[in-house]
Image (tube, rainbow, N blue to C red):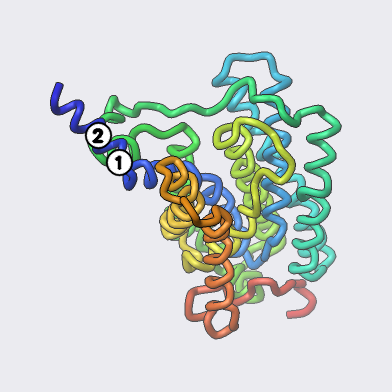
């Protein structure tokens, strides 16, 4: 009994609660950042991640509210719908920048404006009467292998939701895909030198389309993490700029999926810090906005630090990132 009380006391400590919450708040960033990483590895810069996350959040929430099914079935279907919604937004971006060779930065920004908090996602949420209602089903924590009560590591690693474990699997698959499989090596070649990849018989257009769509689908799932777990409801702009953080996170992680995971949790610490401090009454006299702004300040610092072309190359940015490619122009 004394051992259980000791473990409970340790697991309720500020640091453990903060780290466990960081995993929760970092999970949407893992999905969105890995999706953006795959798109960028193919040479496509997608600044529409925020809009795709919002559309995924609202459509995933709508699915849970409308589908009359058991919790597990309903939530699984909601993730599929969120992924399809995100991929549909990504298809617009892919058509503009790959087929029509539009400026990738302009296209991404336009897509975020179109689908963002003041656009399509807000319209859908209001038109479908989703605002203010709690989700019929939400992802809850799973005591994995009965180890949730283990001191320190239990709450952090073994008492999380299925979305967290799914994000870990995604990182592992993405890492192996890019480093150990032929298609993964091909997409890296497309991102580095599309002309050389084309000469080797690799279809540059197909690879760029496929990875941009996958990136959009993962952004949609990342958005659904907010409406189906973190908040458990739909509100306008509920992602709060997480899409922009995900874009910066790819640079911060040197275009590596495993470092995306660590970076997402670091941003998760800054996201959950104000709530953890408020819960313990440690924010007396300090405006909460100071702590709320920390993730975005960190994002700006990262982007400024690596804004030059030389810095991006040293960090491992794909050489053809943002550069349109047409075979006739070789």
Q: Identify the residue at image location x=59%, y=20%.
A: 73
Q: Where the C terminus falls, by quadrant? A: bottom right
Is 74 positioned to the left or the right of 141 in the image?
Answer: right
- Counting from the top left corner in percent of width and height, residue 116 is at 77, 50
Pointer 2 local density, CA inside 10 Å: few below 14, some 14–19, many at least 20: few
- 172 horizontally vs 106: left or right: left
**Element class at badge 2:** helix
**Can you identify the residue that label 1 sits on?**
13
Q: Residues within 10 Å of mark 1 (few under 14, many from 20)?
A: few
Q: Residue at x 24, y 33 (%)?
A: 150
Q: Secondary structure at mark 1?
A: loop
Quarter where residue 152 is shown? top left
Where residue 46 appears, as percent x and y from the top left, is 68, 61
Q: Say how many tags the image has.
A: 2
- Do labels 1 and 2 touch, CB within 8 Å? yes
Point out residue 264 in the picture as x, y percentages from the top left corner.
48, 54
Q: For residue 113, which quarter of the picture? A: bottom right
Residue 180 is at least partly visible in this image: no
On screen, residue 29 versus residue 219, left or right, reads left
Residue 148 vertical placement versus 219 (above, below): above
In front: 288, or 84?
Answer: 288
Question: Residue at the spot x=63%, y=59% of the render?
Answer: 244
- Farthest residue to the left: give it: 2
Residue at mark 1 to residue at mark 2: CA–CA distance: 6 Å
Q: Nearer the viewer, residue 238 or 116?
A: 238
204, 314: nearer the viewer? 314
Q: Which residue is mark 2?
A: 9
């Amino acid at each position: 009994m004394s051992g259980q009380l000791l473990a409970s006391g340790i697991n309720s400590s500020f640091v453990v609660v903060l780290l466990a919450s960081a995993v929760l708040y970092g999970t949407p960033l893992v999905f969105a950042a890995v999706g953006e990483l795959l798109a960028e590895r193919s040479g496509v810069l997608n600044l529409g991640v925020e809009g795709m996350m919002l559309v995924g959040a609202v459509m995933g929430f709508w699915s849970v509210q409308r589908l009359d099914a058991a919790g597990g079935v309903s939530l699984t279907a909601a993730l599929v719908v969120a992924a399809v919604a995100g991929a549909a937004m990504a298809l617009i971006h892919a058509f503009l920048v790959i087929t029509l060779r539009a400026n990738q930065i302009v296209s991404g920004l336009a897509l975020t404006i179109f689908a963002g908090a003041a656009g399509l996602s807000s319209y859908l949420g209001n038109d479908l009467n989703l605002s203010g209602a709690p989700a019929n089903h939400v992802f809850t924590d799973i005591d994995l292998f009965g180890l949730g009560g283990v001191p320190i590591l239990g709450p952090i690693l073994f008492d999380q939701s299925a979305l967290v474990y799914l994000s870990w699997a995604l990182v592992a698959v993405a890492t192996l895909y890019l480093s150990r499989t032929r298609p993964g090596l091909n997409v890296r070649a497309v991102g580095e030198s599309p002309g050389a990849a084309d000469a080797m018989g690799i279809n540059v257009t197909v690879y760029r389309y496929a990875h941009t769509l996958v990136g959009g689908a993962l952004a949609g799932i990342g958005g659904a993490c907010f409406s189906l777990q973190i908040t458990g409801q739909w509100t306008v702009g509920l992602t709060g700029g997480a899409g922009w953080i995900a874009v910066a996170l790819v640079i911060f992680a040197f275009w590596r999926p495993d470092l995306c995971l660590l970076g997402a949790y670091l941003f998760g610490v800054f996201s959950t810090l104000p709530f953890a401090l408020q819960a313990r009454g440690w924010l007396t006299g300090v405006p909460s906005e100071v702590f709320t702004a920390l993730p975005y300040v960190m994002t700006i610092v990262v982007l400024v630090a690596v804004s030059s072309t030389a810095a991006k190359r040293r960090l491992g940015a794909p050489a053809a990132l943002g550069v349109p490619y047409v075979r006739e122009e070789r």
